[in-house]
Image: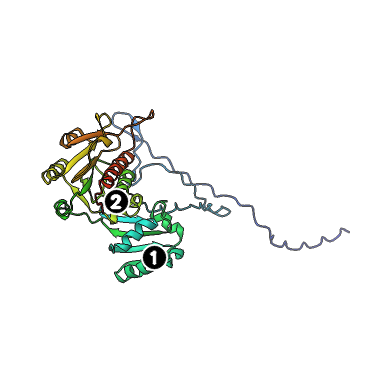
Amino acid sequence: MAPTPRPQRPKRPSTKAKPYSAAKPKTKRPAKLVRKATGEVSRPERPRDATRTAKVKDITPTGAGSRAPKTIKTRMAPEAAPTVVESDEAELLYGKQSVLAALQNSRPLNRVWLTEKLRYDPRFLRLLDAAKAGGAVIDIVEPRRLDQLTAGGNHQGVAAQAAAHPYVEFEELIASLVERPDPVLLAADGIEDPHNLGALIRSAEAFGFQGIILPQRRAVGVTATVAKVAAGAVEHLPIARVTNLNQAIERLKEAGYQVVGTQEKASQALYELKLDGPLVVVVGSEGKGISLLTQRHCDHMVSIPLAGKTTSLNASVAGGIMLYEVMRQRRANQIDLS
């Protein structure tokens, strides 16, 4: 007798995930061929999207089991530090001497930035309170903020925003010196380097000159760099800007001034010329010196004797030597420069 077969138990559903099988991409049926009347066979053109300009492969994964695209981190470029703009419309003063001179002369200031250490410095305390009463904003800042404002300049912990330098009228400058027995002025012919101009203004004030004359074109005016190099001298000397320096020289000659310029090949040495009476000293630019036209308007051209192999001097150095010689002769003759 055959054994009775045992009944089979129903199979339990498997808990294992079925292996992922990507769906087969649908293939587009080829376009029907069109037989032309001429017997040629052609495929109709596929309509194009007007906005499509280039074929771009879509790499975005889709479907189950796909990985999310990686996030690409971008770093924003740091904000550029503000730079000092050399302009005559607004002036950024920086450095202790420049800002102190502006405060002492009650020059209108819009804002003053300085470190906490200088805020209560005895030299600044009273003057800053007066500037604040006049409407200036006083900001206590970190040194790095001053580095940004001055584009890395030697700010010494303080900077100030002032209006454009207050130039004087040329005729007013002449009129203000009428009663002086022996006035002396400095005229800069085409100096473009603000460091040279600042050094000349500083020397002129130190040696007792009463004013500066600058041309408006092809020359630097009183900028932040000029004021910084001049170490406050721009606040103590009247400075006039003229449209035509040669016409201004002729006007000064009519008013009784002697005009003296420098030229390295001039036959007369600086110390051989008597530098008394109303005087205008003309200093030329860095490379070209005094222009030929301006030389013709000068009463005398003198040279600075040199003993070494160097054949020329920097504009501010040559100018400083001339300015000192004026002071030396006048002191020897007991002429008051104050």
Q: Nearer the viewer, residue 208 or 159?
A: 208
How far across and how far down the image is residue 190, in percent?
Answer: 24, 40
Asked if one can make out residue 57 in the rendered structure from this viewpoint, the answer is: yes
The residue nearer to you, when weighing 19 against 214, is 214
SS at mark 2 in the image:
helix
Residue 321 x/y as whole percent = 31, 40
Q: Residues within 10 Å of mark 2 (few under 14, many from 20)?
A: many
- Relative image position of residue 200 (x, y in whole percent): 30, 45
Q: Amino acid at mark 1?
A: Phe
Q: Is residue 217 visible?
A: no
Q: Quadrant of the N terminus?
A: bottom right
Residue for badge 1:
124
1 vs 2, front mark: 2
The three-letter amino acid code for the residue at tag 2 is Glu
299 left or right of 117? left
Residue labelled with disc 2: 205
Q: Residue at x 16, y 44 (%)?
A: 257
